[in-house]
Image: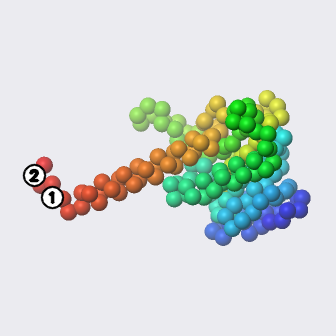
Amino acid sequence: MSTSNGSVAAGASSISAPQECTFCKGDFIVTAELYRDDELIVIDDRRPAGKTHWLVMPLRHIRSVEDLTPSDLPLYRKMLALSEQLLAIHHPNLTPASRYHRLRIGFHRGKRDVHVVGPVKFHVPDVISVKHLHLHVIVDIDSTIKALKYPLWNELIFAKSETVLRRLEDEEKRSKDTSTVSKNNEGTDHTDL
């Protein structure tokens, strides 16, 4: 990948990625690269929805926010920390009070089944255009129409970054609790129960 305008993303992932991922295949046009290290890249969105619209992306292939697991927590926390560092540099005037109205940080949702009641569930189709995980960081959204594409009020379409972090931390805690219970029960004879 290059920082020059119109460059193509090449060699983004060292893991073999599915054919549907334009980023990993190198077919993704990068308008401007703000940051890159061995795990992450930050680029300008080709069709910005606001004054600033960055995409924070891992270089290894992860399809969508639904595919994140607790083992991805260090990477995810790094994505969030990097977005905050860039916001502090490029938008130092963002205050805690103004962030609610001026800032959107989150993900479009991938396809999934949503359980309504018990076994009843419905399928929610993809609303992601690039099938490679990317965190949207948008400051001062341009219009109501564009705001509808990144709705903080509709978690079926757009997952807020804090919600995703809580989900991953909860899953990690449940996993640790389960393994602790399993270890505590090893060697216990329950024949008298």
Are dots 1 and 2 in contact, CB under 8 Å? yes
Image quadrant assignment for residue 151: top right
Front residue of 166 and 95: 95
The residue that label 2 is drawn on is 192
Q: CA distance from mark 1 to mark 2?
A: 8 Å
Question: Horizontal and vertical percent for residue 123?
Answer: 55, 39
Residue occupying the point 30% across, 57% down: 182
Q: Amino acid at mark 1?
A: Asp
Front residue of 95 and 81: 95
Q: Is residue 122 visible?
A: yes
The residue that label 1 is drawn on is 189
Q: Residues within 10 Å of mark 1 (few under 14, many from 20)?
A: few
- Give the vertical position of 90 relative to 100 (above or below): below
Front residue of 80 and 10: 80
Q: Residues within 10 Å of mark 2 (few under 14, many from 20)?
A: few
Question: Horizontal and vertical percent for residue 13?
Answer: 68, 66
Question: Horizontal and vertical percent for residue 134?
Answer: 69, 52
Residue occupying the point 88% across, 59% down: 6
Q: Quadrant of the N terminus?
A: bottom right
